[in-house]
Amino acid sequence: MKMTLPRQLWLLAWIAMGTSAVFAAALPTRHIAVSARVEPAVARAGETVKLVITAVVDEGWHLYSLTQKPGGPEKTTITLAESAVVGKAGAFTGPEPKRVRDTAFDMDVEQHEGKMEFTAPLALKVDAAVGKQKIEGKMRFMLCNEQSCLPPMTAPFAAEFTIEPGAPRAEFVAAVSTAPAVEAKGAPEKFGGQADGLGGLILLAIISGLVSLLTPCVFPMIPITVSFFTKEASHDRRRALQLAVVYGLGIIATFTLVGVVLTLLLGAGSANKFAASPLVNIGIGLLFVAFALSLFGLFEIQLPSSWIDAAQSRAGAGTVGAMFMALVFTLTSFTCTAPFIGPLLVAITQGAWFWPLVGMGVFSATFAAPFVLLALFPSWIARLPRSGGWLNSTKVVMGFLELAAAMKFFSNADLIWQWDVFTTPVVLASWIVLAMLTGLYILGKLRMPHEEPVEGVGGVRVMFSLVFFVLALVMTPGMVRIPPPNLIDSYLPTPVALKQQEKLTWSDDYAAALKQAKAEGKNVFIDFTGYTCTNCRWMEISMFPQPEVEAALQKFVRVRLYTDGGPRGQENQDFQIARFGDAALPLYVVMSADDKEIARFAGMTRDVKAYLEFLKKGL
């Protein structure tokens, strides 16, 4: 697939597949054949033999190497069952992988195609029984092609060989190392910035931290930071410096601590699970709404009185407040920082501590630095003459931006829970309205209850109001399905097929569709799809509306089965796996009215002619 998506969504998709082990266990190992042999086939007790695992993958498919770095697709692993004849098993090595840049993960991935062999030395026990013996094990892998990926699967293997009588021969006795697999080049596997040393890791962390400042999780914290420190330290520069340092160190400490704790408690995918949680997204959305109302002047955000009373002095209370703000910043930013910290957290679960902690420390320090400056800045602003009016207007404008950010997080939860409320048109419409209201507010046409009317509109106000009016204007075409600019479109929820604009109607019950097909003398078209499946959305929005494709689909009884969520998601996935031996999405199948398969088409395609040929087989 060539479409560009926020990396968080791709990572969520991989996690979803990775946690589907129970279904992968039931999935036949299609598109691959796995076998094993022992060399030499006849050996003696105490000697060293070589176990060779051969995998042959169908053309167009590939799996990932033994040394695939964390943070991307699942690497291949080989495990051996306990054996009465094998004393020590060495690490498996494989052929030189094909290295490909994967834009979805923004990393290089290592692939194997066609026929490949993985080998490991095995030291036979000196008391191994003479006669025919067997070594068994399992190979776990993930298969992908250009259109789709299958969930990780496990293929068993067994290799038979013979142990003959006699003492071990010196030429067949070798030391066996159990060191983990290394890259085919022979260099030790390197993690993250280790590939370029400490300097490379620090540079990557700094760049990632700066980019994170522009994400919808982090940017909305700017106005609330200004508001908090304006109140706490507007007349005391020394106090401002103290709170700013506490705030910055608090961000670094809590960010690193939260990351490590989540990883140790919930596993390496905790950051992604945290980011994907509907409850977390709703919580952050509500938090931003509260921030917005506070910036509008409806109330002040204060620490609980018990917290303040517990502090021994006013300075202590301010310190607690700064630490609390740092914790809030950490929790909200976690949903947008998974692309960088995900691989670091994986390394922690594998026993590596130094590099991940350095990476997270530098990363958090980088995006904490601007907030430390903002914490100092309000004390300078407060000393400027007549600063109150324009500073209050700035806070209100930022409040509108907070509401826009809240809509983004509500739509994330909607996408997972399938409310179909915060869809792309709804979110886009809310942003247009908020942009218009912001422009009108800047011009003085709107004001908060506690504000005085604006006396005169200068050139600066007109200029800033035009920015928001133009922003509303460029977003408006999106309401009629003309994509807005990419920068805006990238923050919109995954497009949902607009039912009110679809000419095709769909059933969600396969049994009912079969009955209808018999009554009407038609065949059934099954669309196995998913709520979080980007390729599925592309087909529904770009392929199905094609005139010839739409005309062909009109001749079927159509049923759309979601397999990744909804009240019947599990049932639909079980049906897809049991009946068609495939769990990849999208999958399109044409069935006769008497429940017999006629044709199937797996994955996404941009070739209208090829898709039409598939449909015509079922007409």
Image (cartoon, helix red, strand yellow):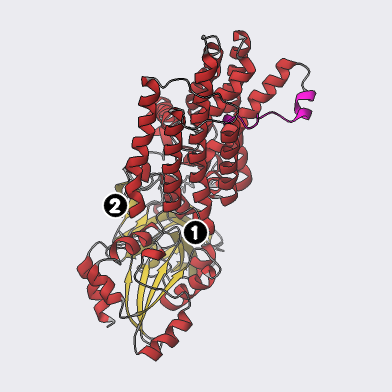
Q: Few, some or many C-alpha atoms within 10 Å of disc 2 (few <14, some 14-19, many ≥20)?
A: few
In which image quadrant can residue 417 be found?
bottom right
Residue 197: horizontal and vertical position, in percent?
Answer: 40, 28
Q: Which residue lies at the image location 46% right of the left edge and 28% below the top edge?
A: 444
Specify the label residue 420 is tagged with.
Answer: 1
Q: Is residue 174 above or below residue 258?
A: below
In which image quadrant can residue 546 be found?
bottom left
Q: Is residue 450 above or below residue 343?
A: above
> Label 2, label 1: how many angstroms apart (C-alpha)?
27 Å
Residue 32: horizontal and vertical position, in percent?
Answer: 36, 67
Specify the label residue 2 is tagged with.
Answer: 2
Quarter placement of the C terminus: bottom left
Residue 254 shows up from this direction: no
Q: Determine the secondary structure under disc 2.
A: loop
Q: Which residue lies at the image location 59% right of the left edge and 35% below the top edge?
A: 293
- Say whether disc 2 or disc 1 marks the residue closer to the N-terminus: 2
Question: Do tag 2 and tag 1 residues touch (Cβ < 8 Å)?
Answer: no
Q: Give the range drawn in magenta.
A: 295-310
User: As drawn, which residue projects farthest toward the left?
Assistant: 609
Of residues 458 and 501, the one nearer the viewer is: 458
Residue 567: horizontal and vertical position, in percent?
Answer: 56, 68
Q: Is residue 521 above or below residue 190?
A: below
Q: What residue type is labelled 2?
A: Lys
Q: Determine the secondary structure under disc 1.
A: loop
| Horizontal side of residue 545 vs 419, given as left or right | left
Count every numbered label the image shows and give the total. Answer: 2
Q: What residue type is labelled 1?
A: Asp
| Horizontal side of residue 6 vs 271, given as left or right | left
2 vs 1, front mark: 1
